[in-house]
Image: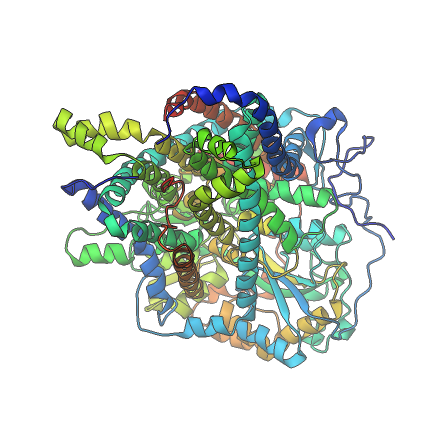
Amino acid sequence: MARGKLERKPLIPVVVTVIFFAWLYLPILAVALFSFNDKKSLSSFSGFSLRWYDALIHDSALIDSLAASLRIATIATLGSLVLGTMLALGLERVRSRRGRVIGAVTLLPLVTPEIVTGVAALLLFTGIGLKLSTTTVILAEITFSIAYVTVIVRGRLAGIALEVEEAARDLGCTPFQAVRLVILPTLLPALIGAGLLVFALVFDDFVLAFFTTGVDPQPLPVRVYSSIRFGVSPAINAIGTLMLLASGLLIVAALVIPRVLARGSSSLDLITGGDVR
Amino acid sequence: MATAVEAPKARKSPRSAQKTSLWGWLLALPTAWMVAFFVSSMAIIVLLSFGRTTNDGYPVFATSTANYRAIWNQVYLELFLRSLLYALATVVISALIAYPVAYVIALHGGRYKNALIAAIVVPFFASYLIRMYAWKALLSDDGLVNSALRGMGLTDGVTFLNTRWAVVGGLVYGFVVFMILPVYASLERLDVSLIEAGKDLYHSPVRTFFSVTLPATRAGLYGGVLLVFLPALGDFVSAQLLGGASTYMMGNLVQQQFAEGQNWPLGSALTVGMMAALTVLMVIYLRATATRTREL
Amino acid sequence: MTRRRSGLILPRPSRRGFLAGGLALGASMTLPGCAYIRDDAAVDAPLPESAKAEIDGDLIYFNWADYLAPRVLKGFQEEYGVKIVESNYDSMEGMYAKLAAGNQYDIVFPGAKWVVKLRREGKLRAIDKAELQNADQVFYSGSYFNDPWYDEGSQVSVPFTVYKTGVGWRTDKVSTMTNSWEDLWNDEARGHIFTLDDQDEALAMAALILGYDVNTAKPSELEEIKKLLISQKEYLRAYSSDDINNMMGGDAWIHHMWSGDFLYLRQGLADDPTQFDFQSPSEGVPINSDAYVIPTNAKHPGTAMLFIDYLLRPENAIKNMKYLYYPFPVKDALPAFAELAADVPACNVEVSDLENENVFRLLGADETQRRAAVWTEVKAS
């Protein structure tokens, strides 16, 4: 926790921060701007028009894809949160060589190029005779998201001293109760942060999704990816803007709701930030 | 803040058996999952790397080392080095951006801290592909940026796209978030009085930074480096959309083998080779940083 | 009933086993035998029957993204009261991988050589022309498509579109074009030249300059092609298939381009069409075509037949052409295309073009890999 505030705002870092935000949002604004472009150009804005949004609303494939993406991302996030947290808890406390090996192996998904994970998943599923479908997408996405949850939760867990848990046990908790009543609540900020991160990653995933989808409506990014090599139409910009709005609302909801429920605890202490209070 | 206490250690023994079994159990289910899905799919890739392709183009298991011999050539090695270089540049630039930004938000953000972090994460949700493509539109020779520069009379037009800087810029754009968040988390937990003390001691913000802030936030930095370097190395989107004639990366190469190249065994061998090299680097890196983070 | 399991083919003789959840099984671990790709489907195996053209469910559609006019897709859904469930691929290889994995699509749009490959593997069912009311739009007497090179007797495919590859350029930036592929080495446009990011197209372009077959896999010829392409790099800005936007954005002054893309650029997008021109180099141009096929394992082939028929209606072909700017070989729609391409005759694909030998043929794995190795080296150097 950053106690207190430093007096003077340092000039250069502030300037860097401002420039950074401008740079971060420039393409977003461009995407949003050109989604209202009258003509199909990506270089010059010729007039305001809602035609691309109009086309999208009537595009049932798009709506199905969006629904598929949301469903996949939600389930995959929950799955990887559960498994990743279990893994993190186990790894942090089991200090044996086996634990270290497992820990290292769980980092491997981060190292593997996406197309390889896609092909590998495809070969695995077909190898065991599992038909490709939304289920296989979810299974694959969970598998490759666990690593992110584990890294984040472990980082947070390292800050929770063993003694806190010991103290809980001294007070009469069973190990399971200690986990449930003491550790998980303090992990909550990390879980929310990891959850948001995984949701964003899965929602936006295209390569792994492509290789593991069946004939069900495909996740949205697969469609974007299919056209990206040959150029993007402004309809894609409209899709991008909508995705941004949807996710913005989602994040706001994720922030506001826990705050309302927990009354005052800052739920956006993302990614291991936050106090052990 | 909890401090190390000797007494509980003596009492650990009777409980530790219980504890280990719970944690061991917790470890078992996800491990089983990972083995079932991840390890086995990676095993297929490893097995396939010893395979070959039939004349009709099907990948087949075999026991040939031809693929590994094939990847040990100058072209691929140079490509790997180039990718390492781009990834390193990405890491360095990301760190140079992440520290000021995280610092300002963590230590001067006040009430707006959370909103600012949210503002960094939200764009992340708006399709990586679309945002990268937007850069292509913005930075093209007749795009908005160049039009603005010409309009201001500053220059006749800068060639942004299809250069190695465009590729690195794209990589930074895509992955800097992974550096900002861990660094922010570290800074957020920092006791500001340490920095104040440092300023009193060193009288220079720069020295304070290097002697106090940076070491104290090491954990965040190390985590960020890992989370940026690894995906940047295997990325293919940036080079494909923004790259030039000589910016081909490992990610593109692997992609090609599985697609146009129709050579899954070779692609597998390339991947295994790359992952082996990265694992070695990662082990060295983790060893070098592990002892330090234990102190925290 | 054969259980449709899939796995990689094992070389015979080989051990068969099961890849269980753990690595601990040791060396005796292999994938189940029944193939990921069946290698024993003989070429002269009886062709799975054509379906009747009738609605038998929703259409499971597998194509490039944005490759048909949305209005047409919508019209089909409304007229027949079915849904089109769309999946997209990013490459022919990706399409093939999904098909080989067992996904059951009703209609797919492969390129010519992929029709050959899919047919050979028994993955396509027959398409009975008699079921298509608009068959005579494409399969009229004397039509090339009655017996195209990629589908003998036109049994399993219906042509979708045809196109050629040439060179597009900015007339206001370059004035020294010579109607040759060597214009991609033009000094005036140095640093503003793009080559398509496509193995077949790039190698073909070099092969045509050197006078070789576009499908060549001879090591000596490939070596020369490699040197030629590497020599282009000092002029080249990038390898990219996003030709339309590269030209529109001003990055490209000369672009290795597909004919339909150029037409779209000039007639559909450009503020000043005369700023752009296209040439069909004199050394020869590659001709390619895409076709509709119905996979053997399609669940609703009847709907697929109706869909093909629907697309062959001239009014729908015209809508698609106005969306894509590629010619659809639908007889009554061709005049509309001629009108679109009136200013750029070089974009027209004549029937005589179709009969030339510059088509991308299906090659054996060795040959493909030799070509791929060359392309890799060119791109990586």
Asked if residue B260 can be seen in this view, the reply is no
Q: Quadrant of residue B209?
A: top left
Q: Quadrant of residue B1?
A: top left
Question: In the visual, does A216 lie left or right of C233?
Answer: right
Near-viewer residue (C72 or C120): C72
Asked if residue C323 can be seen in this view, the reply is yes
Q: Residue at x 41, y 30 (%)?
A: B84
Query: Relative to C146, is B258 above or below?
Result: above
Near-viewer residue (C238 or B61): B61
Residue B284 placement (x, y as % from top left)? 45, 21
The quarter of the picture where the C terminus of chain C appears is top left
Residue C42 placement (x, y as % from top left)? 82, 48
Q: Residue at x 35, y 45 (%)?
A: B173
Residue B57 placement (x, y as % from top left)? 69, 41
Near-viewer residue (C195 or B254): B254
Which residue is the extreme one toward the right? C1
Q: Residue at x 60, y 33 (%)?
A: B22
Which residue is the extreme one toward the left? B203
